[in-house]
Amino acid sequence: QKEVEQDPGPLSVPEGAIVSLNCTYSNSAFQYFMWYRQYSRKGPELLMYTYSSGNKEDGRFTAQVDKSSKYISLFIRDSQPSDSATYLCAMKVSDSSASKIIFGSGTRLSIRP
Amino acid sequence: NAGVTQTPKFQVLKTGQSMTLQCAQDMNHEYMSWYRQDPGMGLRLIHYSVGAGITDQGEVPNGYNVSRSTTEDFPLRLLSAAPSQTSVYFCASSYSNRVYFGEGSWLTVV
């Protein structure tokens, strides 16, 4: 069983829709949770970072963590065609740089104009 | 404002050839790493380094070597390329929870 599971999609929604991207994990030691966005033929870039259960909002993006269920989500409101990308969840045990990051396999998202 | 720079961006190798993927960062980060990304597999850690002179293996190290003689540079060497090493390779540089990735190197082994 993979430590981090993520639905690969692809997910296609119309512009303006609310998008929900999800990951589950098995290692209860994970404390830090991240979402990366990766455009085609580019490297991943950090989108959201959180270390506590609950919601964290940044503009149209909300990251949600439920440690009791080992489940994290990324919500995108008022989705735009520019949000079309692959989204990877990632998590680690501590905030040290040396703590290894485990990535999900990524969900490919397409926003239709 | 370069961040993490990887070269080459595209490369085709024949089975058995060796080559080096170059990676340089200008953020003075101690922690650097190499990942490969394959369809359905996500990003898998090949090797990492916590500082100059210190390297260690990640999840999928076989067939790859690294060295870290300076803080800035972290090259990845393929010793004898195999078709299974066809992949996209990303170099990354980290500080705390912020990871900065390079643009990627697309490698095909025929």
Image (spheres, helix red, strand yellow):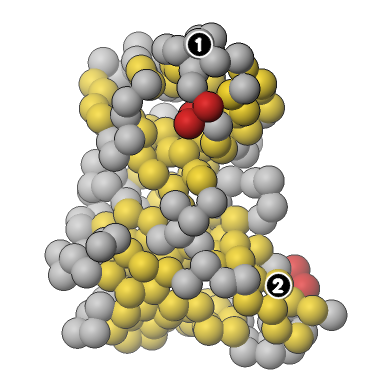
Q: Farthest residue in the bottom direction?
A: A17
Q: Percent x, y for residue B23? A: 51, 24
Task: Give SS at disc 2.
Answer: strand
Task: Give SS at disc 1.
Answer: loop
Three-letter code, disc 2: Ser
Tell me: B22 left or right of A83. Answer: left
The chain containing the residue under callout 1 comes to: B
In the image, residue A69 sits, relative to residue A105, either above or below, namely: below
Residue at label 2? A110
The reply to whether residue B67 is visible in this rendering is yes
Q: How many marks?
A: 2
Tell me: A79 left or right of A94. Answer: right
In the image, residue A93 sits, relative to residue B83, either above or below, namely: below
Gap between marks 1 and 2, in whole Å? 39 Å
Three-letter code, disc 1: Gly
The chain containing the residue under callout 2 comes to: A
Q: Which residue is rendered at x = 55% and y = 79% of the image? A: A61
Q: Which residue is rendered at x = 49% and y = 56% of the image? A: B40
Residue at label 1? B16
